[in-house]
Image (tube, grey):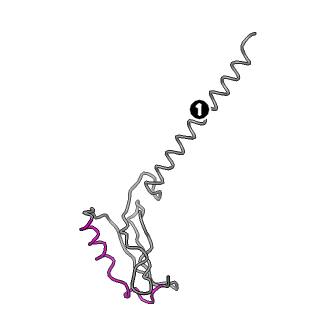
């Protein structure tokens, strides 16, 4: 879709998010906004405090017709691995666990083969 010429063509997104919070009874989180205009059109850039990262859309564009490209309210997260969303941390944990099981299985097979060859006949 085409981008709007002015950010003021779109409704106040913070008001939309306030309505989402009331409807979903969500707890508000820390976030900072920086309104920016570029050659590509007006957009809202969501930035989190130092030491945290954005969960959800970090760039929201005002589109032609006065609608936002995304209206889901982003949040800030302080995960142990800064910059990696919590869902990706879970995926990393699953892959690490599977890799460990694979290495231990291969080590058991190699140990079995070595022990069988070392047995006196």
Badge 1 is on which residue? 104
Give the side of residue 5 with respect to residue 32, left or right: right
Residue 65 place in picture, x, y as percent: 41, 87
Q: Quadrant of residue 109?
A: top right
Residue 9 place in picture, x, y as percent: 38, 88
Q: Residue furthest bottom?
A: 5
Give the side of residue 94 with respect to residue 28, left or right: right
Identity of the residue drawn at 45% across and 73% down: 59
Name above or below for residue 2 compared with residue 79.
below
Identity of the residue drawn at 64% across and 32% down: 106
Identity of the residue drawn at 51% across and 49% down: 92
Give the side of residue 41 with respect to residue 77, left or right: right
* Front one among 35 and 1: 1
Q: Residue furthest top?
A: 121
The magenta segment is 3-23
Identity of the residue drawn at 40% across and 60% down: 52
Question: Is 21 one of the magenta-colored residues?
Answer: yes
Question: Is 100 one of the magenta-colored residues?
Answer: no
Name above or below for residue 18 compared with residue 66.
above
Residue 71 place in picture, x, y as percent: 37, 73
Q: Quadrant of residue 6?
A: bottom left
Name above or below for residue 71 compared with residue 8.
above
């Amino acid at each position: 879709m085409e981008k709007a010429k002015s950010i003021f063509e779109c409704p106040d997104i913070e008001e939309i998010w306030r309505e989402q919070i009331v409807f979903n009874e969500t707890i508000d989180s820390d976030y900072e906004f920086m309104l920016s205009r570029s050659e590509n059109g007006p957009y809202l850039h969501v930035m989190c405090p130092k030491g945290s990262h954005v969960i959800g859309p970090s760039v929201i564009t005002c589109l032609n017709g006065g609608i936002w490209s995304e209206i889901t309210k982003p949040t800030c997260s302080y995960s142990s691995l800064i910059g990696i969303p919590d869902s990706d941390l879970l995926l990393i944990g699953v892959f690490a666990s599977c890799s460990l099981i694979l290495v231990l299985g291969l080590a058991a097979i190699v140990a079995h083969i070595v022990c069988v060859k070392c047995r006196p006949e």
